[in-house]
Amino acid sequence: MTTTYQRPKRLGAKLREIRASLGLSQRQMLDLIGFKDHHHAFASAWERGYHEPPLIALLRYAQAAGISTDVLINDELNLPPPRRNHYANAAPILIVSNDKSDRNWPIYHPADQFTSEQEIALYQETLAKANGNKSKAARLLGLKRSTFRSRLKKRGISH
């Protein structure tokens, strides 16, 4: 017995809608999901349904939008409507992975999903992984060094 795979018909439109809700260009979206070495035509091909993105790309799109991958690949499920300014104050989350290709890419989720305690824990954990190097920690979080230092000061974290 052979199982046939049916490509989701609405996947490309959902990927385009996520990118648009984040206010990103195709190049910026590829950078966000860790495909910095790929030409923006990859995102275009995914959004138009010419090619199917790899599983890791789908996972990162879903994480960036704060949704389940089920919503992306199930044509019967719709994307939730983005709240007004939902991603305007996006805060990075460090994804820890044993896969070296995953190590330095930031994933963004709405800042309102964080408590200050979670944010402090994230910053302390990232500083520890960077051996106290604020520049490296900022890069891991996808932030400018000055922004990271400002957030540390705001949260009363000294290193």
Image (cartoon, rainbow, N blue to C red):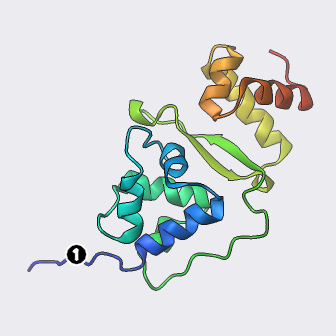
Tag 1 residue? 5
Report the number of discs.
1
Q: Viewed as shown, does residue 121 lie left or right of 59?
A: right
Residue 85 found in image quarter: bottom right
Is residue 155 shown left or right of residue 52?
Answer: right
Tell me, yes or no, if residue 130 can be seen here: yes
Tell me the SS state at disc 1. Answer: loop
Q: Residue 56: image x %, image y %?
A: 40, 51
Q: Position of residue 141 (x, y in %)?
A: 64, 34
Q: Quadrant of residue 80?
A: bottom right
**Which part of the image, by quadrant, shows the N terminus?**
bottom left
In this view of the protein, which residue sits in the foreground, 37 or 131?
37
Left or right of 158: which side holds 73?
Answer: left
Q: Is 18 positioned to the left or the right of 145 in the image?
A: left
Amino acid at circle 1: Tyr
Give neighbour class at mark 1: few <14, some 14-19, many 20+ (Cα, 10 Å).
few
Q: Is any atom of residue 67 visible in this view?
A: no
Q: Say above or below: 7 vs 37.
A: below
Nearer the observer, 78 or 97: 78
Residue at image coords 51%, 57%? 61
The quadrant in which the C terminus is found is top right
- Residue 130: give x, y in percent of width and height: 62, 18
Q: Is residue 107 above or below residue 77?
A: above
**Which residue is nearer to you in this view: 145 or 76?**
145
Point out the residue furthest to the left here: 1
Percent coordinates x, y for residue 158 in the rendering:
85, 18
Task: Give the residue at x 83% y 40%.
Answer: 117
